[in-house]
């Protein structure tokens, strides 16, 4: 695919970032796209390798090589190289409902498994993907795909994150009457309320929602399914009203740190902090929620993953005095052993754009307690740990902090409310039990996909599960399905 000798003649050229001093002044996206010529040159580097791991086996399980939605990467690379952008968009959308999401926030396991990554020069697949879909929107190619006939079947989707959106769009295109229930004021789930605007501006979600509404999807906002809040709907009512129900909420139960001082003011879950800033940017009222702000404070982020990075970038833009990120794992190697890891996703040192903006990163650190004054956190009491996470005597130290953000991941969906009322079976990790052959829960007409079924994962995995769940529901309702995987 592409130019046969392109990988020999053209160097890898990735998108650049706006300078740190400039981008810290705002919450807008700061990635600078490549020119059309440069993007086509990058697509020309795709080398027609014998086994394109980039899209071959990613759907098997996390950690296996390739793209979870099985994007036909060599094909759309060749189409871009040939200048056939509209056909490239059709190809890309045949496997991925929302490439503008993954083109911005996916870690790109496809690039890790690229044959050219054997010498650290993979094709810039993520950049090309984003260029294709952005050009498609700019040129008006992404029209609503309205089902020619209606099935008369009604489906409820609970949760409007990437899994719920993907399932809803696929089911609407199959002719079903699809209703999406979202407890917040707008659609998107963590795409909207977790991922900062400087990584993905929210008009990117809004235009997809508008497309889906034109395709017949009905969105119900500010509606809690289960629970005791005002206006909450008993989930059993959905079972009576709809032919099928899909549970596609997130894994929202955050991993806590139950140590002395945890109840001090200033110690918060990351997901109490990040959504507030996203609401400020979109002028969505915070209501009576107490504001959590980093301005003028020494901030410590506990957790070294993507959520921790989002906390760093947000804190720096709010004017934090300093930001320190703590990770209990040891520092990963600077480079992987290609002979051992390729084409799988390697464990190696990575620096996110937010970390590069000025965070101090500490590895193999355990926080043992928080201390404060007048009920407000002031210090973390930490110790270095060995490879078994046991404290190393004599390595104790303290960190000043007026704001501590817990970003240690999520353990499972919230059980109280909807899940307990429905009585669906849970797996040993506390997620909704459903297999990947039919995505059906222990209740006959209730399905589940995304983080609610698999636990904390990637947006691209949520999209794939949403598509497959939609296919399973269509099969269940109609006896057969033509929806693609």
Image: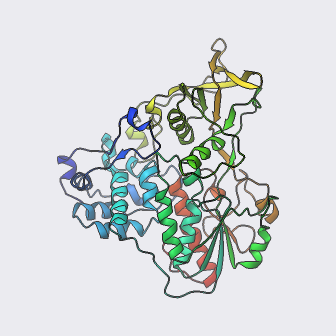
Residue found 63% across the figure and 51% down from its top: 285
Name the foreground residue: 81 vs 61.
81
Residue 193, above or below 382: below
If the image is split into quadrants, where does the N terminus sit?
bottom left
In the picture, residue 23 is in which quadrant? top left
On the picture, is 236 further left or further right than 58?
right
Q: How is the image coloured?
A: rainbow
Residue found 59% across the figure and 86% down from its top: 151
Q: Position of residue 338 (x, y in %)?
A: 38, 39
Residue 376, above or below 342: above
On the picture, is 92 further left or further right than 293?
left
Residue found 31% across the figure and 64% down from its top: 75
Q: Can residue 52 be seen in this view?
A: no
Q: Position of residue 247 (x, y in %)?
A: 67, 64
Q: Position of residue 401 (x, y in %)?
A: 63, 24
Residue found 57% across the figure and 58% down from its top: 188
Q: Position of residue 113 (x, y in %)?
A: 39, 49
In the picture, residue 407 is in which quadrant? top right
Q: How many marks do you count on the picture?
A: 0
Name the foreground residue: 357 vs 210.
210
Name the foreground residue: 279 vs 124.
279
On the picture, is 15 further left or further right than 355?
left
Pick out the residue farthest to the top.
394
């Amino acid at each position: 695919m592409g130019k046969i000798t392109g990988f020999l003649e053209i160097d890898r050229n990735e998108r650049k970032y706006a300078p740190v001093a400039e981008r810290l002044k705002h919450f807008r996206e700061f990635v600078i796209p490549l020119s059309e010529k440069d993007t086509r040159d990058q697509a020309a580097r795709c080398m027609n390798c014998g086994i394109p791991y980039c899209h071959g086996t990613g759907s098997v399980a996390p950690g296996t090589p390739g793209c979870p939605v099985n994007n036909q990467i060599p094909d759309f690379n060749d189409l871009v190289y040939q200048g056939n952008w509209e056909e490239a968009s059709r190809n890309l959308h045949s496997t991925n409902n929302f490439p503008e999401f993954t083109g911005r926030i996916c870690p790109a396991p496809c690039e890790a498994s690229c044959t050219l990554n054997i010498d650290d020069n993979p094709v810039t697949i993520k950049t090309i993907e984003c260029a294709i879909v952005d050009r498609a929107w700019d040129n008006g190619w992404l029209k609503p795909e309205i089902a020619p006939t209606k099935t008369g079947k009604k489906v409820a989707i609970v949760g409007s994150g990437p899994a719920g959106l993907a399932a809803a769009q696929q089911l609407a295109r199959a002719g079903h009457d699809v209703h999406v229930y979202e407890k917040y004021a707008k659609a998107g789930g963590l795409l909207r309320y977790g991922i900062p605007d400087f990584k993905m501006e929210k008009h990117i979600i809004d235009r997809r929602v508008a497309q889906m509404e034109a395709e017949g999807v009905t969105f119900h906002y500010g509606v809690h399914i289960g629970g005791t809040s005002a206006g909450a709907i008993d989930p059993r009512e959905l079972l009576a009203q709809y032919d099928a129900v899909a549970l596609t909420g997130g894994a929202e139960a955050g991993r806590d740190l139950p140590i002395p001082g945890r109840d001090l003011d200033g110690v918060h879950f990351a997901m109490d902090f990040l959504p507030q800033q996203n609401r400020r940017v979109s002028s969505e009222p915070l209501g009576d929620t107490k504001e959590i702000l980093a301005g003028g404070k020494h901030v410590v982020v506990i957790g070294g993953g993507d959520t921790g990075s989002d906390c760093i970038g947000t804190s720096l833009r709010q004017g934090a005095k300093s930001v320190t990120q703590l990770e209990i794992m040891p520092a990963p190697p600077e480079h992987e052993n290609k002979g051992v890891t390729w084409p799988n996703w390697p464990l190696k040192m990575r620096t996110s754009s937010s970390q590069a903006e000025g965070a101090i990163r500490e590895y193999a650190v355990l926080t043992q307690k928080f201390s404060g004054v007048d009920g407000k956190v002031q210090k973390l009491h930490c110790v270095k740990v060995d490879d078994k996470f046991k404290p190393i005597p004599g390595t104790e130290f303290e960190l000043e902090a007026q704001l501590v953000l817990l970003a240690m991941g999520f353990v499972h969906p919230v059980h109280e409310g909807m899940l307990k009322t429905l009585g669906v079976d849970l797996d040993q990790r506390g997620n909704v039990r459903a297999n990947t052959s039919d995505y059906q829960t222990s209740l006959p007409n209730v399905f589940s996909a995304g983080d609610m079924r698999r636990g904390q994962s990637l947006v691209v995995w949520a999209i794939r599960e949403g598509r497959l769940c939609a296919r399973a529901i269509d099969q269940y309702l109609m006896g057969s399905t033509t929806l693609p995987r």
